[in-house]
Image (tube, rainbow, N blue to C red):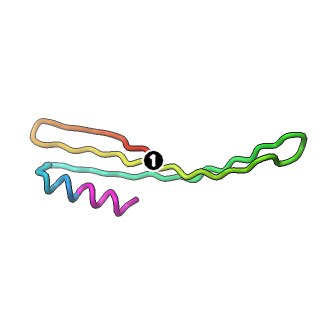
Amino acid sequence: MNETCVEIVEKLEKLGCDNAIATSNSSICSQIKFANNKIVRTSTEESGSIHLFASIGQKTAETLIEK
């Protein structure tokens, strides 16, 4: 995801942004379901997000993109 953040900032700078910040976060979650003292189901899920901030002159924008 770090490469994606670098690409986003470079594109925003080419479009004329004065300031551009992109940060990423990723995590892996595991779950185990028990029923009657037995494992019924297991699952693993990966999630991530990218937080963007950009400004041009007096105008600013901020957004969160979740995977």
Q: Is residue 4 magenta?
A: yes
Q: Which quadrant: the N terminus?
A: bottom left
Looking at this view, name the residue that lies furthest to the front. Answer: 40
Magenta range is 1-9
Q: Nearer the viewer, residue 59 or 12?
A: 12
Rendered residue at 48%/53% (across/down): 26
Q: Is residue 55 left or right of residue 50?
A: left
* Amino acid type of the residue that numbered disc 1 sits on in the rendered structure: Lys
Looking at this view, name the residue that lies furthest to the right. Answer: 36
Rendered residue at 74%/47% (across/down): 32
Rendered location of residue 28, percent (x, y): 58, 53
Q: Nearer the viewer, residue 20 or 37?
A: 37
Q: Is residue 13 left or right of residue 36?
A: left
Rendered residue at 76%/47% (across/down): 41
Rendered residue at 55%/52% (across/down): 46
Magenta stretch secondary structure, dominant:
helix
Q: Nearer the viewer, residue 26 or 36?
A: 36
Rendered location of residue 42, percent (x, y): 73, 50
Rendered location of residue 67, percent (x, y): 45, 47
Rendered location of residue 29, percent (x, y): 61, 50
State the image quarter where residue 57 is shown: top left
Residue bearing the label numbered 1: 67
- With respect to residue 16, does 36 lie above or below? above
Label 1 residue SS: loop
Mark 1 residue crowding within 10 angstroms, few (<14) / some (14–19) / many (20+): few
